[in-house]
Amino acid sequence: AGVPLLAGYNSKYLIKYAAGDEIFLKYIFHILSIITYLYVFRFLRWAFFNNDKNNKSSDISITRNNFVFSILTPLLIVIIITFTAKSLIGLATIDFHILDGILKNSIYIVVSLLILATFNWVHVKEKPVPSLNLLLIKIKNFMNISKGEDKVKTLEVDMENQIYNSLINTSKTINNILPKKLQTQLLIIPIAILLLLLFI
């Protein structure tokens, strides 16, 4: 969001500094900052201040403890580094106008909170967990409807066989098209990546 005293403020200020006095870009930066605050506040409310009766109190306390250690600790480190960022990256000649940044960010915060309050924090219904099985059932039903057949509720064996057969046929086609030397060279890539990951 480009909050003053954090590294994001310095980076956003440098982008604005490089953009110059272009009025259109200034309005774009203001709008982007408000949008950033909108989704940050929505996330914070959903993740840490959600008063859902289905949640157990122990789960909420665990979530808040995780928040302290996983977010606030690196955040404090970033704040400390940010205070010395100007001298570290040789930007001592640029004045970052911290007070101006605090004023603008206060306006962004008020505007974004008013928008969220107006739209009741833009509540979104919880969506089902993505499932490959459900996706394949939808594909199968689409194929059945196009053939004039009935829909299915479970994934049938023939659908799995069709997928496996298509993968095998694709592999055979690639095997016939590519020369053997090139296939051998292509095999070196995943092996090299695997070895690299093992040593890292």
Image: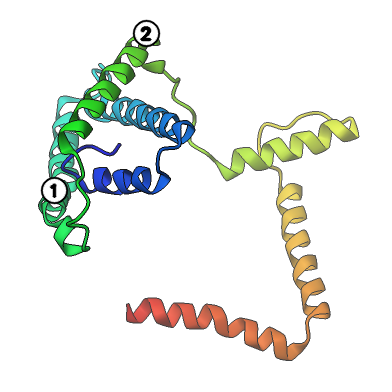
For label 2, the crowd category at 10 Å Cα-Cα, with few meaning under 14, some 14 to 19 and many 20 or more, is few
Residue 26, picture quadrant: top left
Residue 48 percent location from the top left of the image: 22, 29
Q: Which badge, 1 or 2, comes first in the chain's sequence? A: 1
Q: Residue furthest top?
A: 118
Tell me: residue 168, above or below residue 28. Answer: below
- The quarter in which the N terminus is drawn is top left
What secondary structure is marked by label 1? helix
> Residue at the location (12% across, 53% down)?
77
Say the numbered circle drawn on residue 79: 1
**x, y percentage for residue 34?**
36, 27
Is label 1 in contact with label 2 (beta carbons under 8 Å)?
Answer: no
Q: Position of residue 80 (x, y in %)?
A: 10, 52
Report whether 69 appears left or right of 155. left
Q: Amino acid at mark 2?
A: Thr
Bin the neighbour count of mark 1 within 10 Å (Cα to Cα): few under 14, some 14-19, many 20 and up. Answer: some
Q: Position of residue 168 (x, y in %)?
A: 75, 67
Residue 77 shown left or right of residue 22 in the figure: left
Q: Residue at x 72, y 91 (%)?
A: 181
Which amino acid is tagged 1?
Ile
Q: Residue at x 22, y 58 (%)?
A: 91
The C terminus - image quarter: bottom left
Residue with the most extreme bottom position: 181
Report which residue position mark 2 lands on.
118
Measure how far apart labels 1 and 2 are at the Cα level.
33 Å
Which residue does the image show at 16% across and 47% down from the upper left? 75
The one of 72 and 172 positioned closer to us in this rendering: 72
Residue 139 falls left or right of residue 102 = right
